[in-house]
Every structure is written in C-alpha cells, then in structure tokens.
Amino acid sequence: MNKERVLSDRDLWYLIAQSSLGKNHRPLNLCGANLKGANLFGANLQAADLRKTNLKYADLRGAKLEFALFDESDLSEANFTEADLRSTSFKSARLFQARLDKANASNSEFSYANLMTASLRDCDFNGSNMQAANFSGAKLSMTIFDGVDLSKADFSNTSLRSCYLKGALLSDAILDSENLMIVNNLRF
C-alpha cells in the first residue's frame, strides 16, 4: 500500500524552521509529499528536495527556492510570483497555469517541463535549459530567454514579440509564422 505524506501548513512551517536552526542550513527533504494548496509565501526552501511532490495550487510567492529540486512535481496553478528560482531544477515538472511573474529563474533546469498556459511575465530565465519545454498558450511579456536552450520547445499559440532572446538556441522549436518572423529578424 502506497501511503502519501500529507502535512498541514503548520507542520510544514515547523519543519522549515527546524531545518534552518543552528549554524548549518540543512536542506528540507519533502520528496513525494502531498503539499497541495500549501501556503509557503516567503518560505526559505533553498536546496530543498521537492521531487515528485504535489504542490498544486501552492502559494510560493517571494519564496527562496535557490537550488531546490522540483523534478517531476505537480506545480499546476502554483504561484511563484517574485520567487528566487535561481539554479533550481524543474525537469519534467507540470507547471500548467502556474504563475512565475517577476521570478528570477536564471540558470535553472526546465527541460521537458509543461508550462502550458503559464504566466511568465517579466521572468528571467537567463542561461537556463528549457529544451523541449511546452510553452503552448503561455503568457510572455518582457520575458528574458537570453542564452537559453529552447531547442525543441513548443511555442504554439504563444507570442515571443516582447521577449529577449539574445543567444537563445531555438533549433527544432515549434514556432508559428509570427514567431518565426520574430526569430528570423533577431540581431545577435
């Protein structure tokens, strides 16, 4: 029988506080936990292991998540607005309708992530790996993709018009005719 961990917000904040006590920060391991709808507003979860975790609908606004692992997690409709996501891994994560507005996700891993209809306005992905990510229907405005590997990424029903793409790798990316014109007119 597969028992799923379920933690209340109070239990979760207690664990976060315990992992931060003393001289040495001990990264929190919540791999596989059910944290659906958790309130983690402003939480310090640097280097936390949240792989295969259910964080659907979670509030992670302003959270410190640098070096955290979210691989294969369900982050659908989670709110990462203004979060620190530098060097964080989201390999094969489900970020369907998630909000990453004004987040710093530079040098992060989003390969094979599903960002379908996500809000990525004014988000910094500088130097990230987003190979084969699904951006179909995503809301992009002032989004920074400088030096990002976007090869095989799907940009169906998404406009790259006001995005920064200097040095981005777009080989085999799925681009509609408008985006193809934008990419062809880029000056590197």
Image (tube, rainbow, N blue to C red):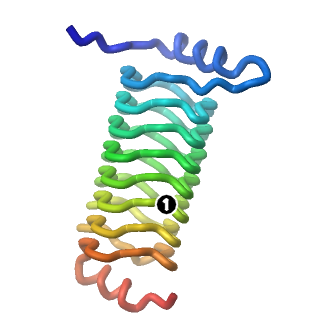
Q: Compare residues 116 and 133 and report the one nearer the observer.
A: 133
Residue at 26% across, 74% down: 172
Query: Is residue 74 shown above or below 149?
Result: above
Q: Quadrant of residue 16?
A: top right
Locate residue 116, reporting x and y percent: 29, 53
**Viewer-side residue, 142 vs 171:** 171
Q: Residues within 10 Å of mark 1 (few under 14, many from 20)?
A: many
Residue in the picture at 41% in, 45% down: 90
Residue at the location (32% across, 88% down)?
181
Q: Position of residue 135 (x, y in %)?
A: 31, 60
The residue identified by callout 1 is 128
The residue at the far left in this view is 1
Tell which of 64 and 29 is nearer to you: 29
**Left or right, 23 with reference to 48:** right
- State the count of labels: 1
Q: Quadrant of residue 40?
A: top right
Amino acid at dot 1: Ser
* Quadrant occupied by the N terminus: top left
The relative height of residue 39 versus residue 159 in the rendered view (above or below) is above
User: Which element is circle 1 on?
Assistant: loop
Q: Measured from the top left, where is residue 138 in percent x and y?
A: 34, 59
Q: Is residue 128 left or right of residue 114?
A: right
Q: Residue at x 28, y 67 (%)?
A: 152
Q: Residue furthest right?
A: 23
How far from the left and from the top, in percent, is residue 86?
A: 58, 50
Is residue 15 shown above or below 140?
above
